[in-house]
Image (tube, rainbow, N blue to C red):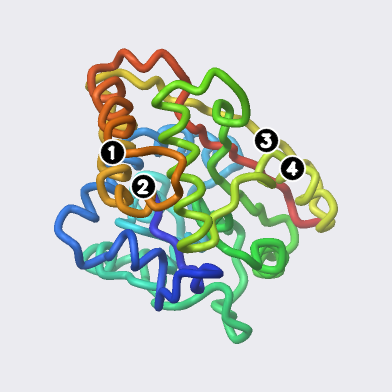
Amino acid sequence: MSTDPVTPGPAGGDSGYGESLFEPWQPGEGERIDLGSLAYDHVTRARLRALGVGPGVRCCEVGAGTGTVARWLATSAGAAEVLAVDRDTRFVAPFAGGALRTLTADVSSPDFAPGRFDLVHARFVLMHLPQWHRVMARLRDLLVPGGHLVLGDAVDLTTAGPPDTPYRLAMRAMWQALRTSIGTDVGWTPDSPRLLRELGLSEVGAEVFVPALLADAPITAFWLDTWDRTREAMLATGLVDAELLDEARASLASGTVADLSPGLITSWGRQP
């Protein structure tokens, strides 16, 4: 899963992506990101393949994280050029070379202009940006005619309504903690296909993938680690107390939660 080149949330005061919650230098943060990659990379790769990624294609991977998608583009997919962009490139930089280059940059900065590409992909990036709509338009402007913009963000299919199980309350607390701390907002993500069409892209499509919350699944380990790292922020929301959060964690870890994980909505469109 990608780390995200974001500016501070409304109340967080971070100097980069969620550094008050997910410090890139904290032990295990790269491994946490890779758990998300194990859950979602196969879906991303299949969509990029279907859109024609291959030899000769110039790619920009925004929010490259540990570089699993960027590395695949530069090797297995055979892309001619892959620019991996992140606010902190420490996880992907060791793999630079050949077709893969890295750029430490903030996509929300007015002077972000890395070039023009056949493919621009960002996963779990825009949802963390208060100015996501402006950045979406900027990413579109990086495309050459005929190029594809592919955006993936979280979609929440469970927490809006009852029942108020410990798992659902914990997820609500997590989303609220992320919104308060770094500005995360997944409320708009189901509208992403329409938004891409409004930006003038053609051949717009979208799909949703929801990984199963099995006891031994990478996505389960990802959420457990994320809850552990955001525990104090989750408790501060007042939506859960320590006992309820521990109950939610136990049910998730044992695979008995009987609910849906937040999923990945992938939307794409073609520059005319």
Question: Does any portion of residue 58 appear in the rendered image?
Answer: no
Tell me what residue is drawn at x 54 percent, y 77 percent. Answer: 114
* Residue 115 drawn at (x, y percent): 58, 76
Asked if the residues shown at circle 2 and circle 1 are in contact, with their CB atoms under 8 angstroms apart, the answer is: yes
Q: Earlier in the sequence, mark 1 or mark 4?
A: 4
Q: Which residue has dot 1 on it?
A: 242
Q: Amino acid at mark 3?
A: Ala
Callout 4 amino acid: Asp
Tell me the distance, in whole angstroms, between the alpha carbons under discs 4 and 2: 30 Å
Residue at 37% in and 54% down: 233
Q: Quadrant of residue 137?
A: bottom right
Upstream in sequence: badge 2 or badge 1: 2
Disc 2: which residue: 235
Disc 2 secondary structure class: helix
Q: Which mark is residue 191?
A: 4
Mark 3, Cα crowd under 10 Å, few <14 / some 14-19 / many 20+, is: some
Depth-wise, is mark 1 or mark 3 nearer the camera? Answer: 1
Across the whole image, how many numbered discs are drawn on residues? 4
* Comparing labels 4 and 2, the label whose residue is closer to the camera: 2
Of the image marks 1 and 3, the number of the one nearer the N terminus: 3
Q: Report which residue position mark 3 lands on.
A: 206
What is the spatial separation of the Cα atoms under label 2 and label 1, in whole angstroms?
7 Å
Which label is found at residue 174? Answer: none
User: Please, is residue 232 above or below residue 86 in the view?
Assistant: above
